[in-house]
Image (tube, rainbow, N blue to C red):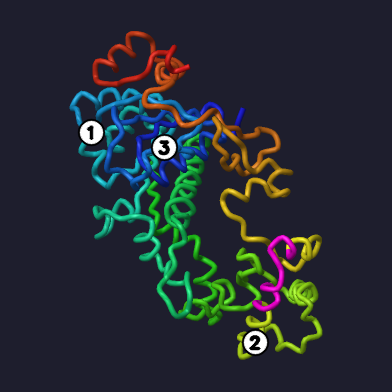
Amino acid sequence: MGVLNGIRVLEFEAIGPGPFGAMLLADMGADVLRIDRPAAPDDLGPKTNGKRIDITGRGRRSVTLDLKQPSSAAAALDLMARADVVIEGYRPGTMERLGLGPDEAFARNPKLVYGRMTGWGQTGPLAARAGHDLNYIALSGVLSGIGPADGAPVVPLNLVGDYGGGGMLLALGVVSALLNVQRGGSGQVVDAAMTEGAAQLGAVIWGLLASGNWREQRASNLLDGGTPWYDSYRTRDGHYMAVGAVEARFYAQLLDKLGLADAGLPKQHDRNGWPVLREAFAAAFAARTRDEWCAAFDGSDACVAPVLGFSEAPDHPQHRARGSFVEVAGVVQPAPAPRFSGTPSRIDGPAPQRGQGGLRALRDWGFDDAAIERMAACGLGFQSEVSAG
């Protein structure tokens, strides 16, 4: 039984941050029912090799509904009436045009938490414009600080906007609004914007900027690779080691393990000496393989770690000891996090096929046969219980 056991979440099919936020809730025990389109759209998200494994879709059940059909709103509103949470990631105004906006939802369910996930937010001059993670973090200011000093900003995967500043922010907002409801408050809209979430992630940088401790020049600061003791270095076998020896006592151990403690190097915080330090560190790391450096730094507080690939990370002893990665339906993936001592999270299976588990979900949500037939007449689809497994 997860910490969110008993919470019903109605999720409208989307990509990126919305599904990720719903995955977090599902991992924590929420009963997530996704409304999928009857057929997979061919213009949603990046093109693949034809095989798509949807890890962020894990742990929920599915019904299908063509929201463009006039009759579909009645079925969707019936589901909203039984839900604790709605999650949608359409452009602002879309749900209202479908007759499924907050006004209609709250009329049926005043305690509903209505989670809205967008890039720009529900209001403002950019609200209706298309965009993706990179656009949102560019406008937030965060992208400007990532990359080499003499080059363009570097794309930090789609983790800062879509997931850290998007799905996680949405999940936090939803849980907070649920807590407010449980304390006697009314339902409300949670307006989660990736641009604002990315900016939140950069809060410490704005503090450094305001105090004169941050230069608006990439790779010239402590946390952006500007210092030689907070960067990654290539090893003899072409891999990398990540160095984060910020504090003096950790920096001293770094020098010792690199064999540079008595090399007469410039002081750690002598900015003019940083090129000399970087050259010395690079030469030292290039002399051994990544595994040899892992052995050399084993047990030390030098704040050095190997840069592992996605396929390598699950096999690291730290992850194995904690069970940080699990295998679900043959797919290795991150385990639920954070950890709860009394109500552990779990993964209730892989992402469903369209309509899989939907009939059982409707019954679990309290719909009788007559109500299910009425919703089916409005276009709601689901697999039979036999084929749903």
Q: Foreground: 368 or 259? A: 259
Q: Secondary structure at mark 1?
A: loop
**Above or below for 335 versus 232:** above
340 relative position to 193: left or right: right
Q: Residue at x 34, y 48 (%)?
A: 46
Tell which circle, 1 or 2, labels the residue nearer the N-terminal end.
1
Other residues around mark 1 within 10 Å, as few (<14) / some (14–19) / many (≥20):
some
Q: Are marks 1 and 3 in contact (CB under 8 Å)?
A: no
Report the residue marked by disc 1. 99
Image location of residue 25, percent across then percent down? 51, 37
Q: Quadrant of residue 143?
A: bottom left
Q: Residue at x 30, y 55 (%)?
A: 131
The reply to whether the magenta stretch includes residue 290 is: yes
Which residue is at the far top?
A: 369
Report the amino acid beneath label 3: Val
Q: Secondary structure at mark 3?
A: strand
The reply to whether the magenta stretch includes residue 65 is: no
Tell which circle, 1 or 3, labels the residue nearer the N-terminal end.
1
Magenta span:
282-293
Q: Are marks 1 and 2 in contact (CB under 8 Å)?
A: no
Report the amino acid beneath label 1: Gly
98 relative position to 365: left or right: left
Between marks 1 and 2 in the image, the one whose residue lies nearer the viewer: 2
Any mark on residue 113, and which?
A: 3
Image location of residue 268, percent across then percent down? 69, 83
Report the residue marked by disc 2. 276
Decide whether the magenta segment is chiefly helix, strand or loop.
helix
